[in-house]
Amino acid sequence: MIKPFEQKVWLSSPCMHGEELEYISEAYHTNWMSTIGKNINEAERITTEYVGCNCAVGLSSGTAALHMAMKLAGIKPGDKVFCSDVTFGATVNPVVYEGGIPVFIDSEKDTWNMDPKALEKAFEMYPDVKVVVVVNLYGVPAKLDEIKSICDKHGAILIEDAAESLGAQYKGKQTGTFGKYNIISFNGNKIITGSSGGMLMTDDIEAANKVRKWSTQSRENAPWYQHEEIGYNYRMSNVIAGVVRGQYKYLDEHIARKKAIYMRYKEGFKNLPVTMNPYDASVAEPNFWLSCLLIDEDAMAKQVRSENEALYIKESGKSCPTEILETLAKYNAEGRPIWKPMHMQPIYRMNPFVTAEGDGRCQTNAYIDTGKVTDVGADIFDRGLCLPSDIRMTEEEQNIVIEIVKSCFK
């Protein structure tokens, strides 16, 4: 008989090691508590060396970094911008901050990321688009070479949202280096954390200097507060940077532990009608930030979701994300639905949405009359879920999680 966990098993909580306190204390004792100091300089330096870029600018969040990337890309009111569809809203909202119109590009099945075929089709439909924002979902690299090649062909700027994929590699190269402007996040649930914070990364020194200026309220070099353009309070705190600085030492260890979690799930579920979130090992090495599963179509129990609630009918030998998530919660373990695709969100439902096979109009139904899935992102959302992937989860606790999931298919 499975008993509830006494201590909650989390989806992905911070994993602290103690050295972070040394750098926080350094900021405290030297009185550098604001947005300048050694910790910021070191966090930026370590990022450039680890990722392999010329410049990194420490900012208050990954969202702030994305906003700065949109400004650098020159988005103007009314400009359409191609964006990954299956992602968190923070990827897309900065487009709107600058007055742009997100056009959502469907996912492909191989990585769950932006489909290059749908992107190429989108350029046929909207040839004037000059900015593309691609996400590496759950730490799995997108087909970055193909996407970059399409952007180059059409003269478009690529922005890589690597918020979830720090430490992941594509063809031996770190993610966060494929775009003209790239971002990572140090939010509390990421592979390493500062509790908050993010970085904008680029090889363009002039662009990096612009972001440093914009993120500190666009102050001019004058003896008084002189402002000649709009600025933002986006700079990273020296205290937060101390946490990031301490965490970087453990990034590779965190990745190894996340990979072990993924592989244990894959082995534990080998006799269930499910698959793990996919990647192509010949070209990509994810950071395995979150382990996710996808239920086979013929093993899906009936499930209905409204905007705020979900219902399902229990069926022998079958299950659905709602049943598994509710069962995990009953045993004091945290799972999550897959990111709900942006084109299905109420705020973006009328935005253009392009699939590899559809007609490009806004679609919210994953199936056409033939029953063939054309909306891949909606299908992944319908059948997929994120499993507890916490670094601090013990192997014994994970084995219990595996048994909980198995019980849902009985």
Image: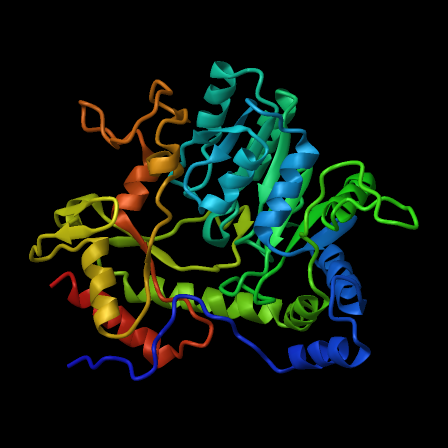
Q: Quadrant of residue 321?
A: bottom left
Q: Residue at x 70, y 35 (%)?
A: 72
Q: Which of 270/159 is in front?
A: 159
- The x and y percentages for residue 25 are 72, 81
- The x and y percentages for residue 221 are 90, 46
Q: Which of 113/43 is in front?
A: 43
- The x and y percentages for residue 36 are 79, 63
Answer above or below: position of 152 versus 5.
above
Q: Residue at x 80, y 36 (%)?
A: 228
The reply to whether residue 175 is in sight is no
- The x and y percentages for residue 368 are 22, 25
The reply to whether residue 362 is in sight is yes
Q: Quadrant of residue 323?
A: bottom left
Q: Which quarter of the image is occupied by the N terminus?
A: bottom left
Q: Residue at x 78, y 71 (%)?
A: 32
- Lateral position of residue 15 relative to residue 235, left or right: left
Q: Which of 212/340 is in front?
A: 212
- Counting every numbered tag in the picture gives 0
- Lateral position of residue 69 relative to residue 384, left or right: right
Q: Which quarter of the image is occupied by the C terminus?
A: bottom left
Q: Quadrant of residue 60?
A: bottom right
- Lateral position of residue 303 relative to residue 316, left or right: right
Answer above or below: position of 178 versus 396.
above
Answer above or below: position of 255 versus 348.
below
